[in-house]
Amino acid sequence: MEALRATYGFESDEDGDDDGEIPINRVECVKVSSLPPPPSDLLQAPNFSDLSAASRTARIRSFPHVEGNYALHVYIPVLIPPTVKKKLMIYVKRLASVVPSLYVVDADIPLSELSKDDENFENVLLGREFHISLGRTVPIQVHQIDSIVAMLRQKFVSQRRYFIEFNKWDVFVNDEQTRSFLSLEVLGRGLSEMRKQINLVDYVYKLHGLPEFYKNPRPHISLLWALGNISEKLKKNVEELDTSRNNARNSGHIFFCKFNSIECKIGKKSYTICKSLDG
């Protein structure tokens, strides 16, 4: 009873029987000092550290980590068709032989090590899901999550399926000039549709005070990365390989796939924004 008295803030009569009943008229309200925390999956701050020891000290975040902020990324998921994986693998191996400092995006594995095992090479490099970004990756706060997700879903309520054509190998460099990326760029079918989708994402970003996408967006997926700005070296080698590659030039594209959905990742949690109506 002494513990209950201390917790609930009441006194019992000295002469009364201690029968374990709490006299309701003596109970005082206890003020709650803080609200319960949000769900645990939203409290997982985005991990901007790198997985490979070789690159931990060299990479720089696009924005500083702040407790309570979560990285927002809106994108179209892309899977490379099995029919073109062998062709892409041959191309990437040739490039790795002249640029040995390349790493696999997301897996952060040196390409020189991966190329020793063809099956593992194909699975790790080409077997994963790739992303076409429709907006910048930016930090947001917990109270913005529901509003952003709801508005994105409202804007993308009716999206038709379309084809996405990857036509060209190209090199991109991040804003901090700390990493170069070997990517496949969309220049043909799907480009106009994606630019409209980028405008819709920009609209939602703007309403939440977030930075809009690049003025002249170039939709692409990234397969490989290297430390620093080595764009000139990469582009030179890509051009030399392209000169000897006739199959992609003759067909007008390297490969194509279908647009099926738009996803939004916030911290470690993913949200489906839309699926194509005829998907």
Image (spheres, rainbow, N blue to C red):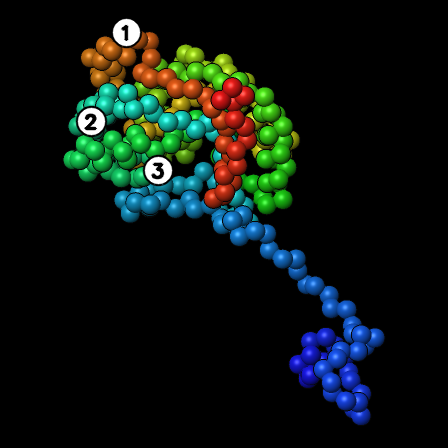
Q: CA distance from mark 3 to mark 1?
A: 31 Å
Query: Disc 3 residue type?
Result: Asp
Query: Disc 2 residue type?
Result: Lys
Q: CA distance from mark 2 to mark 1?
A: 22 Å
Q: Is residue 249 above or below residue 105?
A: above
Q: Is residue 163 above or below residue 182?
A: above
Disc 1: which residue: 250
The crowd level at tag 3 (other Cα within 10 Å; few <14, some 14-19, many 20+) is some
Does the rendering let one see residue 213? no
Residue 135, image x, y percentages: 51, 28
Which quadrant of the structure image shows residue 224? top left
The crowd level at tag 1 (other Cα within 10 Å; few <14, some 14-19, many 20+) is few
**Going 39% across and 46% down the picture, which residue do you hit?**
49
Does the rendering let one see residue 178? yes
Tell me the tag on residue 106.
Answer: 3
Disc 2: which residue: 93
Decide which of tag 3 and tag 1 comes sooner along the chain: 3
